[in-house]
Image (tube, grey):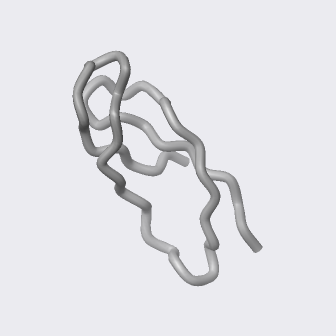
Amino acid sequence: MREQIILACTTCKRRNYSSMKDKRKHQERLELKKYCPFCRTHTVHKETR
């Protein structure tokens, strides 16, 4: 049971990436450090609902 999630930049709040996650194994929100093209730097991206 994998669901599609959307990752948003914590600095500019824009939704830049999408990914898949198994919600049965990982209930907490995902946080990844990814490149934001709007900020032009690597920032922390959090899962949005």
Q: In this view, does 3 lie to the left or right of 49?
A: right
Which residue is painted at 70% across and 60% down in the image? 3
* Above or below for 45 versus 30: above
Give residue 2's position: percent from left, percent from top: 72, 68
Q: Looking at this view, name the residue that lies furthest to the right.
A: 1
Give residue 32's position: percent from left, percent from top: 35, 53
Q: In this view, does 24 lie to the left or right of 47?
A: right
* Above or below for 20 versus 42: below
Q: Nearer the viewer, residue 26 or 32?
A: 32
Which residue is painted at 60% across and 65% down in the image? 21
Q: Which of 28 and 44 is in front in this view?
A: 44
Question: How many dots with numbers?
Answer: 0
Which residue is painted at 35% across and 56% down in the image? 31
Give residue 36's position: percent from left, percent from top: 35, 28
* Above or below for 39 versus 6: above
Q: Looking at this view, name the residue that lies furthest to the top.
A: 38
* Above or below for 17 versus 22: above
Give residue 5's position: percent from left, percent from top: 60, 51
Q: In this view, does 6 lie to the left or right of 4?
A: left
Q: Report the quarter where the N terminus lies.
A: bottom right
Which residue is painted at 57% across and 83% down in the image? 25
